[in-house]
Image (cartoon, rainbow, N blue to C red):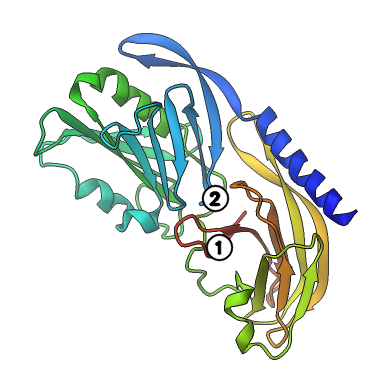
Amino acid sequence: MKRLIACLCVLLLLTAAACAETRERTVIVEGSEETITETLYVSGQGFSVWYDAEWLTLNDGGQRLLLYAAGLNDPQFALEIMTPAAAGTGAWEFISTRSADDTVVRFEDLESGAEMAWFFLADESDPAVLHGYYLVTMDMDEEDPAAPWVAAAATFPIEAGDGAGPRFTEVMRTVSFGGAQAVAAQPAMPVRAAWAEENTNTLTAYLSWNLIGSDAWVLFTAEEEVTDFRICELTMQFTGDGEYTFHEDEVFALDTLWPTQPLIAGLDFPGDMPCWGIRYTDAAGEEHRFTVGISGEDGEIILTPY
């Protein structure tokens, strides 16, 4: 019965997302207004984006989100959105190292509250190819090192520039940050998560919980004593402006998670959308919330604040 309830929860999650994930929007392409139907995609890396699914195909590689012209699967006609880890640079450095001395970098404020810098540049080795480079950030001045940002690179034939360039730019204008960037490296936080099978050999004592009979076990370890530890099933709820929140259904509760006694939980991951979360209070009395997901880059467990 519990497994059936869990499956129904997952079904409701997917149904709710399907009902709210498209919209119509008017854009300017090749000098003319055009009404397009956009699909919302929520990345596990802390941002969301709207894209025209009739024109673009989306492939989520974890730290990299690839959108390419539908039916072509051509790297010379694509938009790649990268997290800071994938970009391998600082935010503004991504733009500055790719621009020439005479490049005109454009800036604009987005409806999501983020800022975008972008420009187009001809390929040095193939003048028939154009590149577009984008930075979308919540802190263009880089005063806050924790501010979320993504970078992107577009490639397309120069003969298609009047159509492809504006379409790719319209995609980037819809980027919104639903939370901080995923904690891929999981820095100094009170609770860490990893696959249990890779760590159980070193454990002398632990708690275990498995609601749905899953074969996938996740290990939660506390660096310090934390209280009111909860595991929740998450239902993603979308707002009209492309933002999203999570509704929490508590499925497991622990008064205290001790450093000497970690928790191993059986969790299923049926798709790309976050469906599990943890909540706890640290020693300073601060409450933390994280989604629990799988990295598309290396398959490891990642915690993303929400």
Within 10 angstroms of label 2, few (less than 14), some, or many (20 or more) residues?
many
Expressed as whole percent of the image width and height from the top left, the position of residue 130 reads 20, 31
Residue 289 position by quadrant: bottom right
- Circle 1 SS class: strand
- At a point 9% along the width and 39% down the height, the residue shown is 125
Q: Amino acid at mark 1?
A: Ile
Let me know if residue 190 appears in the view.
no
Let me know if residue 108 appears in the view.
yes
Expressed as whole percent of the image width and height from the top left, the position of residue 83 reads 41, 52
- What residue occupies the far top of the structure in this picture? 32
- At a point 62% along the width and 46% down the height, the residue shown is 273
**In the image, 141: left or right of 185?**
left
- Circle 2 SS class: loop
**In the image, 244: left or right of 99?**
right
Q: Earlier in the sequence, mark 1 or mark 2?
A: 2
Q: Amino acid at mark 2?
A: Gly
Question: Is 94 or 204 nearer to us in this picture?
Answer: 204
Within 10 angstroms of label 1, few (less than 14), some, or many (20 or more) residues?
many
Residue position for label 1: 302
Expressed as whole percent of the image width and height from the top left, the position of residue 211 reads 82, 62
163, above or below 262, in the image: above
Q: Are marks 1 and 2 in contact (CB under 8 Å)?
A: yes
Measured Cα–Cα span from mark 1 to mark 2? 9 Å
Residue position for label 2: 44
74, above or below 299, in the image: above
Expressed as whole percent of the image width and height from the top left, the position of residue 88 reads 31, 58
